[in-house]
Amino acid sequence: MRIKLTSIMVDDQTKALRFYSEVLGFTKKHDIPVGEYRWITVTGEARDDLELALEPNANPAGKAFQEAMFAQGIPIAAFEVGDIQAEFARLTSHGVAFTREPTSAGPVTLAVFSDTCGNLIQLYQRT
């Protein structure tokens, strides 16, 4: 068994695709119309067989969960980076709003930012 696909809910799929590809640097793998919404996935630089789906938060239960996690300051996903200081500087220069600047936390350094689509995302670098 292995993880092949995971998803996050977003409040606007077009805005999310732009942010995750143009700002974060992920690569669009799928963008398929599915009725009112789209099946959108992105992949990271190291592997194109591990996908992140950008799901619409149209389900009221999902939207309530997303809003509660954001209000409580809890990241919905975590992405590993090789140089968190450089990534922090790069993303800040693109206008990304961080709620937590790079901070040492034992075996990792982490930072948290808003993805502009209703989620907090954690970056981490192993120390």
Image: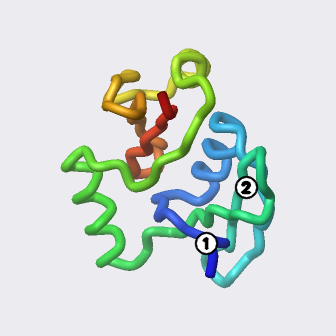
Q: In terms of sequence position, does the residue under pointer 1 or pointer 2 come before the other?
A: 1
Q: Which amino acid, by three-letter code, is at mark 2?
A: Thr
Q: State which quadrant residue 59 falls in.
A: bottom left
Q: State which quadrant residue 82 falls in.
A: top right
14 or 104, which is in the foreground? 104
Relative to residue 55, is residue 116 depicted above or below?
Answer: above
Q: Which amino acid, by three-letter code, is at mark 1?
A: Ile
Q: Image point 67% across, 72% down: which residue?
A: 4
Q: Residues within 10 Å of mark 2 (few under 14, many from 20)?
A: many
106 or 114, which is in the foreground? 106
Q: Residues within 10 Å of mark 1 (few under 14, many from 20)?
A: few
Q: Circle 1 is placed at which residue position? A: 3
Asked if the residue at tag 2 contacts the one at tag 1, i.e. Cβ–Cβ closer than 8 Å, the answer is no
The N terminus, quarter of image = bottom right
The Cα–Cα distance between marks 1 and 2, rounded to whole angstroms, is 13 Å
Q: Circle 2 is placed at which residue position? A: 43
Relative to residue 58, is residue 106 depicted above or below?
Answer: above
Where is residue 18 drawn, in percent x and y? 67, 45
Left of 39 or right of it: where is 46? right
Q: Image point 22% across, 59% down: which residue?
A: 68
Left of 14 or right of it: where is 59? left
Under circle 2, the secondary element is strand
